[in-house]
Amino acid sequence: ERRWGILRLSSFTNTAVVDFKKGLRALEDQGVDALVLDLRNNSGGSFPAGVGVARALLNGGTIVNIADSEGVRDFYEANGTAVDERTPLAVVVNGGTASASEVLAGALQDSRRARIVGEQTFGKGLIQTLVDLSDGSGLAITVARYQTPSGRDINKVGITPDVAREVSDLPLEPGALCDSLGPGGLEDMLT
């Protein structure tokens, strides 16, 4: 029987990457041999933090493409600094999973590093810049959009789970989530 570890990221703050790596190492020290990364209701936050968490789980390959009206202009790659690139991983998502969380889920799905489990994500894949106007108001201008490594546009589409299941009503606390899924439910996430 597998020893499961659950990590929950509720947002991508400036400390998210350090906290995530500490959590991974702590679970490793406890002998965990399968992971659940819970991104439910994570509306995003710091884009660099989302890329940083992806780099903690992927040693190589593209994480995200940045495309404007003329095509792909930039991309972010894994940089060989993964803390854990092998432990079986399921990522739990729902309609509240957006932006940087979708970038992470898309990278892990396209690289086949993780199975995405849950509900269709929100579909927030635009990069906007704010322009201050002379009257004190502002204008948000879309300058580019996120695409998964395989070129899927996230905006207004989101990430489609590999395993569709209702997850929004499951508890957010990791222990309670594990209890509510049970060993069979956790195993179903990986197969």
Image: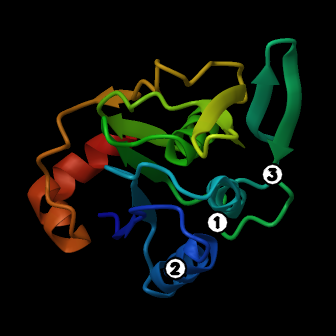
**The label number, if any, that marks residue 34 in the structure image:** none
Residue at 62% from the left image edge and 79% from the top image edge:
18
Please tell me whether residue 1 is drawn above or below residue 131 in the rendered image: below
Question: Would you name the residue on which mark 1 appears?
Answer: 84
- List x then y, in percent, for residue 183: 19, 57
Q: In which quadrant is the C terminus drawn?
A: top left
Front-lying residue, 61 or 64: 64
**The label number, if any, that marks residue 28 in the structure image:** 2
Amino acid on which disc 3 is placed:
Ala
Q: Looking at the image, is mark 1 or mark 2 earlier in the sequence?
A: 2
- List x then y, in percent, for residue 187: 29, 49
Front-lying residue, 182 or 106: 106
Front tag of 1 and 3:
3
Please tell me whether residue 56 is drawn above or below residue 28 in the rendered image: above
Q: Quadrant of residue 160?
A: top left
- Disc 3 is placed on an element classified as loop
Number of numbered discs overlaid on the protein picture: 3
Residue at 34% from the left image edge and 27% from the top image edge:
120
Amino acid on which disc 1 is placed:
Asp
- List x then y, in percent, for residue 179: 12, 65
Residue at 54% from the left image edge and 79% from the top image edge:
19
Please tell me whether residue 171 is drawn above or below residue 122 in the rendered image: below
Q: How is the image coloured?
A: rainbow
Q: Looking at the image, is mark 1 or mark 3 earlier in the sequence?
A: 3
In the rendered structure, the answer to whether residue 131 lies left or right of residue 104 reads right
Amino acid on which disc 2 is placed:
Glu
Q: How would you rate the neighbour count of disc 2 (Cα within 10 Å): few for under 14, some for 14-19, many for 20 or more?
A: some
Q: Give the CA separation, mark 1 to mark 2.
A: 9 Å
Please say if the residues under marks 1 and 2 sit with CB atoms less than 8 Å apart: yes
Q: Give the CA separation, mark 1 to mark 3.
A: 13 Å
